[in-house]
Image (cartoon, rainbow, N blue to C red):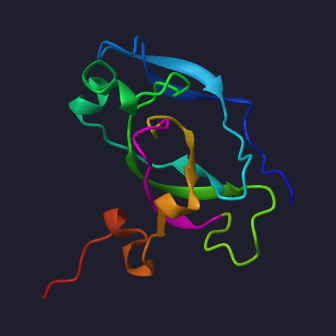
Amino acid sequence: MAQPNLPASMRAVRQRDKLTPELALAQTPVPVPSQPADVLVEVAATALCYSELTWARQNPRFFPPDKEPVPGQDMPGTVVQVGPGSSSSSSFKPGDQVFCRIDATRAGGLRDYTLALESELALKPACLIGFARRELPRR
């Protein structure tokens, strides 16, 4: 599979400390899909809720020691690359516009690119592509 032309690093908003809600902008490496179910998504936008920033203190099980401290579970984006060895029957291919819901135990999408699992993605319906950029028809 051809490698997409990606930068070596990207912007990410990270918690400075797992026990406080303080956020900081950082440069981090672009994640690389390493499993067949991995999908690299260029993030279009994301939102976070305050509770995401307090989980490590209130529920340590939501914040495994190896979890990258990047919040933001819900986001739309564009598939950039699928994992190595993913089957041709994969539901996703580069260029697909998707909605993502990333599991809380993994790093989120408050960054330029994020890794999601195929099971965390849904194709954006064609009727919604460009939705924010055009006027809706009146009924």
Report the residue that reaches farthest toward the bottom.
139
**Residue 78 placement (x, y as % from top left):** 56, 58
Q: Residue furthest right?
A: 2
- Residue 46 against residue 133 in the figure, above or below: above
**Split into 4 quadrants, where in the image is the C terminus?**
bottom left
Majority SS type along the magenta span: loop
Question: Over which residues does the magenta segment extend?
Answer: 95-107
Q: Relative to the observer, which residue lies in front, 123 or 57?
A: 57
Q: Is residue 99 magenta?
A: yes
- Depicted 80 relative to depicted 136: above or below: above
Residue drawn at (44%, 48%), measured in percent from left and top? 102
Q: Residue furthest left?
A: 139
Placement of the N terminus among the 4 image quadrants:
bottom right
- Tell me if residue 110 is in the magenta stretch: no
Residue ID at (55%, 51%): 116
Question: To which quarter of the image does residue 91 belong?
Answer: bottom right
Residue 100 spot, x, y in % from top left: 44, 56
The residue drawn where x is 34% and y is 22% is 56
Q: From this view, report whether residue 79 is shown above or below residue 73.
A: below
Q: Count of labels shown?
A: 0
Camera-side residue of 132 and 120:
120
Residue 75, image x, y percentages: 40, 51
